[in-house]
Amino acid sequence: MKKPILAAILAAVAIAVQAAEPQVINVKLDSFKITPNQITVKAGQPVTLKVKNEAWFISHDLVIKAPEAGIDIKVNLGGGDSGEATFTPTKPGTYKMYCDKKSPGGATHDEKGMHGTLVVE
C-alpha cells in the first residue's frame, strides 16, 4: 500500500516541476512585422520570450501591457540585438503585442502594422 502512495506523490511532484518550467518562444522583429504574430500560452505557466531584432539599422521593441493579467513587458532592441522577457500570465484573455517606436514620418511602427496577439488560455 505504501508504494502506490509514494508513486502518486512522486508523480505529483514531477507534474509540479514540469509546470514551473517556462514555455520558451522565439520572437523576431523586422520591417514592421512581429513573427509569430500570434502567440498562445497558458495562464499560470511561466513564459520566456526570446526576442531578436532582425533589422540591422532600425530599433524595435516588443511591448505587451496587460497588468490585470500580470503582464508588463517592454523589450527594447537596437538593430541586430537580442533580449528576453520572462513573465507568468495570471488571467486568460487576448492581449495586444506591438512595437511603439516611431518612424521619422511620425507614424508608430504599430500603426504601420507591427503588432500581433498574445492569447492566454
Image (cartoon, helix red, strand yellow):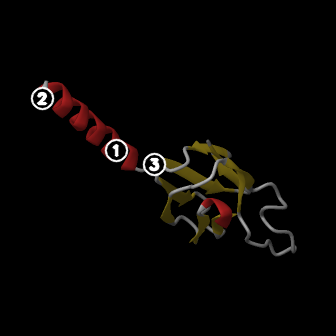
Q: Earlier in the sequence, mark 3 or mark 2?
A: 2
Q: Residue at x 51, y 49 (%)?
A: 26
The numbered dot on residue 1 is none
Exactly how many numbered labels are in the figure? Answer: 3
Q: Position of residue 105 (x, y in %)?
A: 87, 73
Disc 2: which residue: 2
Any part of residue 66 in sight: no
Q: CA distance from mark 2 to mark 1?
A: 21 Å
Q: Residue at x 18, y 25 (%)?
A: 4
Q: Image check: 17 left or right of 61?
A: left
Closer to the camera in the image, 1 or 92: 1
* Quadrant location of the N terminus in the rendered image: top left
Q: CA distance from mark 3 to mark 2?
A: 38 Å
Q: Earlier in the sequence, mark 1 or mark 3?
A: 1
Disc 3: which residue: 24
Is disc 3 surrounded by few (<14), some (14 to 19) or many (20+) residues within 10 Å? some
Q: Image check: 59 left or right of 21?
A: right
Q: Quadrant of residue 103?
A: bottom right
Q: Which amino acid type is marked by label 2?
A: Lys
Disc 1: which residue: 16
- Which element type, helix, strand or loop, lies under badge 2? helix
Q: Residue at x 74, y 69 (%)?
A: 100
Q: Position of residue 98 (x, y in %)?
A: 71, 60
Q: Which amino acid type is marked by label 1?
A: Ala
Residue 61 vs 48, above or below: the answer is: below
Q: Earlier in the sequence, mark 2 or mark 1?
A: 2
Q: Which amino acid type is marked by label 3?
A: Val
Q: Position of residue 14 (x, y in %)?
A: 28, 39
